[in-house]
Amino acid sequence: MPSINCLSNTTQLARYCTFALLASSAMQPVAARAEEDDIVVTATRRDSTVQDTPIAITAITATSLANIGATNIADIEKLAPGLRLQDAGPGQRRISLRGILAAGEPTVGVYYDETPIAGNVGTGSDSGGRMPDFSLFDLERIEVLRGPQGTLFGASSMGGAIRILFAKPKQEYEASAEGSIMSTKGGGVSYFANGMINAPIVPDLLAARVVAYRRRIEGYIDNVQLGLKDVNDATVNGARLMLRLTPSPTFTLDGSALIEDTNANSYSWNLDVGRYKYRSYVRLPYKDRSRIYNGTARWDLGPATLTGVTSYQQRRFFYTSGDDTTVVVSRRNPTGCQQIFGGGAACDPTQLANFYAYMDSFIPVAFQTPGWTKDWTHELRLTSNGDHWLNWTIGAFKEDRKNYVDSQDARADLATGIVKQPEEIVYHRYVRDNYRQIAGFGEVSIKPVERVTLTAGVRYYDYKRTIRGETDVPWPVLNARLRPPYLVQNKQNGWLFKFNAQYDITSELMMYGMASQGTRPGGANQTIGLPDALVAYGADKLWNYELGLKTSLFNRRVNVNGAVFQIDWKNMQVSGTTPDGFYSYITNVGAARVRGAELEINAKVADGLTLFSNATYLDAKLDEDQINNYIVAAGRKGDRLPFIPHLTGLAGVEYSYPVSASLNFYARADANYVGRSYSELRPANPNRVTLNDYALANVRIGVEVPGGAWGAYLFVNNLTNSVAVGRASNTAFPNTKLATSATPRTIGLNVRAHF
């Protein structure tokens, strides 16, 4: 019988090898079989494995993503310790790692291949809550890097970075297809369909890989005001074209175009109205047209590899962000008349009647924020090849990002909740936010003695932000007065540092210690009525101190990785609210300390049977009082940071068994737990909402051909139909106690094939 090479990093091939080796009764050594799980990662800008990389990193393979039915970044939250995602629907997902979560620029850098993703700042300077996402079909892997990655990945990676790496074109013919149909309790029937074709265009020179997909998601949330059912539906269409040119063995040029169009509706519901129900006079649609174009060249010069990257991101979006009818209704009273019509004096009966008629003309009215983002990024880096006593990386980075957003209220139809056409704008302002930065970075690793590696990294950054705006259609109902064109600027420069020490105790046991910095850029608020002293806000910065251990046991059948850390976060950017409750803004107040521990375990307890788990404990608190008269219930030392539970974790099992020479049985079950958290710092804050702890369980069973030629699977997500609230908020206005939560129990069928 011919020999069988099972040294692969794909789980599907591993299943084939397991069966073939049993059938031949000529099993290879256990250690050799275990090497198939040594996933190669490039988190440090050079090839390494998860177990040999001295940082906290989780690598998620394409097979693992397929086995959980992942379609977008929201589906990977449970797979990495400390990863949290506040999901308000497509284009409105805020990501955090290790409890570093706040309004403003993102705290986690998200990369699609070599392209850093930019969110739109909106009128509240909150680009971290307006991040686009793309389909996860046809990937090589995802790398989740925990802890600051400032030296190599720059600003907005202060909590960590997520790298989504697509499968690249090959010099061979290949195709795959996948589809699912599913039914959600209380909702409709949804589906998705994915396809990929890979082909050589010019033999040994040019290859292409094309991906196309469509997702149709039926809703389960009802609008009781308009009498509409299942309003939170979504349709996503996308495509990806990738070209690879290899004119020589030492030079590769990759080009890609990512296209995704989303039409969706709000995922929010009212906690005080009923489960999966909300009361709104208007519909809340969301449209997003996202494009990413990238060119990446790699040239192997022998001693080093030169990499050049140019990316362009273009995004056009249209949020109907809220129902401002609630504001109109709350101010339709004698007090409102006194403030809006009477100039502080009580209204007489005639004034009051005219005021009521005036306010009734705005019922209903929708708050809209259409806009666009254009972002150019460029990076050039040189990395030493091989693994020597001295290894290094140097590089430079440049970004030019332009944002535009309108902030407007428009009248809607009372019967349908649809904004009237042509639009009747009752309030309008605009914001232009231009952000430019340059940076230089480098890392050097030395091995002074056997088994010891010391690394130092540094990054210099220099950025400038220019913000322009104008309120050209005032509306006294929102205290929005005419404001002529204005300009504010913010600029800053500085240094980020990283120090790492690695000790390979044995070939299967490694310990590391690290101190690293992260930062986010500052900016300027465009908030109406804000004092001049609070218009600009500065960068926040943190230090992360970490000790980690990585070990492989029982001939590498069991991997156990853990870390303990402390993060000192200074000059925090937090979200505040103006005293009238109408507008949010960002300011620097207070400091925080996050102490935590992470653990990951993956165990092959028998051939075809794998157990996996992870757990994170976080103690995230303010380290000093917040002092700001404009913050509602300002935080005090010892207050827990919002939306950060103490404990999160995952436990699961995956089993594959050959039932015949041509068919395997496959089963997977997992459950993840998220502890209790709160929406505001102060227990006395009247807007504070408690987010109760919850657990989500998922099950998948099916049959598949060894090697992954095809497979069919039944699955149940949210088996116990848990109401898992991931984000909640509240204001002083009625019908604004909003929540977003996990999808109710969903049952479906998934089929996939590879050719």
Image (tube, grey):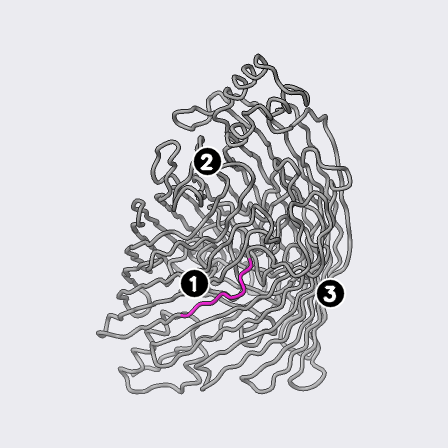
Q: Which residue is mark 1?
A: 62
Amino acid of disc 2: Leu
Q: Which dot marks residue 284?
A: 2
Note whether 10 is above or below 370 in the view shown: below
Q: Secondary structure at mark 1?
A: helix
Which comes sooner in the sequence, label 2 or label 3? Answer: 2
700 drawn magenta: no
Residue 411, position in %: x, y? 50, 24
Residue 429, position in %: x, y? 63, 29
* Residue 755 visible: no
Closer to us: mark 1 or mark 3? Answer: 3
Q: Quadrant of residue 657?
A: bottom left
The magenta stretch is: 644-651
The foreground one among 27 and 583 is 583
**Pointer 1: residues within 10 angstroms few (<14), some, or many (20+)?**
many
Amino acid of disc 3: Phe
- Most prominent secondary structure in the magenta stretch? strand
The foreground one among 755 and 227 is 227
The foreground one among 340 and 426 is 340
Q: Which residue is mark 3?
A: 497
